[in-house]
Amino acid sequence: MEALADAAWDRFGAVHLVHNNAGVLIRAPMLDADDKDWEWILAVNLWGVIHGVHAFVPRMLEAGDEGHIVNTASEAGHFAGDLYGVYNTSKFAVVGLTESLARELRNTKIGVSMLCPGQVDTGIFTNTNRPASYKRPGDDVPVERRVADNAQTPDDVAAKVIAAVEAGELYIFSHMDEARTLIEKRHERLARALNP
């Protein structure tokens, strides 16, 4: 990531928009996940964002220009899903990281957003990009994918990201009705716990 930042500044002289967009997953009971599963998911989904923030944000602040950081979390960063415990954990961490980053940068010229997509038609379910150092037997088998009726294209989501960045919004949901229902259920449970 540092080499990418060097290359970007060398080529363009400045960087104004960074989108830390990384995601891999396994679909299995969390208790069946081994250290390699956890290390791979966290290395990409969480550490990918951390490395992107560390490589770009200090330089952007030093330049003093307006800019914006977008970190891809997921709907799964706001509520738990069956058989996605490792993935959920990584994306909950990205939500916390991004909300914290937004607070730290609130009095600067750098805006912060987090993309929380539902199902998007990408290669995330193929499982073919798992490095050898993180592989387990059978890891080349694609993850079972249940294609949602409301799956969106990357272009659809990109348009929502651009609009949200221009509006300075922190949260970007691709599937707003779906996310609203699931997040409201979670918050109702939290509210009940606070008001027994």
Image (cartoon, rainbow, N blue to C red):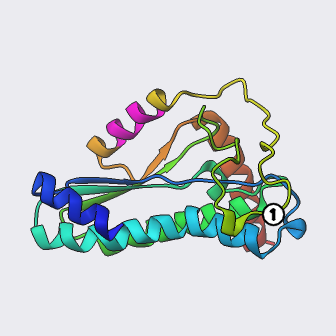
Q: Amino acid at mark 1?
A: Arg
**Which residue is depicted at the point 49% across and 32% down?**
154
Q: Is the residue 62 above or below the residue 143 in the image? A: below
Residue 15: horizontal and vertical position, in percent? Answer: 19, 56
**Which residue is depicted at the point 90% across and 66% down?**
32
Q: Is the residue 169 above or below the residue 112 in the image? A: above
Magenta-colored span: 157-164
Residue 177: horizontal and vertical position, in percent? Answer: 62, 34
Q: Is the residue 40 above or below the residue 150 in the image? A: below
User: In front: 70, or 7?
Assistant: 7
Residue 86: horizontal and vertical position, in percent? Answer: 74, 64
Q: On the image, which quarter does residue 4 sit in?
A: bottom left
Q: Mark 1 — residue?
A: 136
Q: Secondary structure at mark 1?
A: loop
Q: Mainly helix, strand or loop, the magenta region?
A: helix
- In the image, is residue 158 part of the stretch drawn in magenta? yes
**Which residue is depicted at the point 77% across and 76% down?**
35
Instruction: Determine whether, in the image, residue 148 is placed left or right of residue 108.
Output: right
